[in-house]
Image: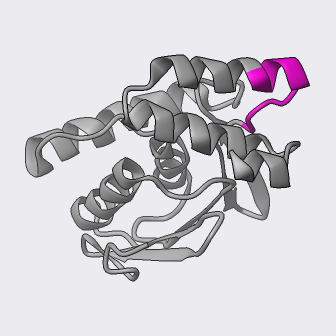
Amino acid sequence: MRLLEMEPANPGNYVLISNMYAVKDRWEDVEEMRMRMNITGLRKDPACRWIEVGNMVHTFIARDRSHPDSDEIYAKEVQITEKLENNGGSVAQTSERRAIAYGLLTTPKRTTIRIMKNLRVCGDCHTFTKLISQFFELEIVVRDANRFHHFRDGVCSCRDIW
């Protein structure tokens, strides 16, 4: 709670504390954090990814279908998921897929894909991106809120320590 005293206007602190409560199954405390955010008018920034293709930046937000190539991107996501499930086992449902799918659709084969995101890479996204780099023989550079991750041949430059 000291974190909230230090930065009461930072919604990330409320989310962090709420997530810690959730891990401990303290659901009443989770609800209290959400209520406090509501009362103070704070909102969590949505997860967002950007990819630059042909000198144009394309933005992807979870569950957003506003991109003009949305149908093709979702079809590519299905293709990616099927390939990874058939060759790499189970695949997490990550929102990283949309930006990577767009990169695969719009760049020449084996072109390095560069993605930026406003949040830290989660474990599921990290695993997913490693699999993409391996099964699509692709280099992917992801700049998250903390660092760069360079994926190649199913391995990340951070050696899975981030």
Between 51 and 44, the one lying in front of the other is 44
Q: Is residue 14 above or below residue 53?
A: above
Q: Quadrant of the C terminus?
A: bottom left
Between 137 and 107, the one lying in front of the other is 137
Residues in magenta, as a range? 36-45
**Total of numbered circles in the picture?**
0
Is 77 on the left or on the right of 81, as rendered? Answer: right
Residue 153, quarter of the rendered image: bottom left
Give the percent coordinates (x, y) of residue 67: 69, 31
Give the percent coordinates (x, y) of residue 44: 73, 35
Q: Residue at x 71, y 45 (%)?
A: 12
Is 135 on the left or on the right of 37, as rendered? Answer: left
Q: Residue at x 69, y 54 (%)?
A: 118
Q: Is residue 110 visible?
A: yes
Between 7 and 47, the one lying in front of the other is 7
Q: Residue at x 41, y 29 (%)?
A: 75
* Rendered image coloring scheme: one colour
Give the percent coordinates (x, y) of residue 16: 60, 44
Residue 77, quarter of the rendered image: top left
Q: Residue at x 62, y 70 (%)?
A: 146
Give the percent coordinates (x, y) of residue 50: 68, 53
Residue 1, quarter of the rendered image: top right
Q: Is residue 58 visible?
A: no
Q: Is residue 159 above or below residue 120?
A: below
Q: Is residue 9 above or below residue 150?
A: above
Is 118 on the left or on the right of 148, as rendered? Answer: right
Q: Is residue 26 shown in magenta?
A: no
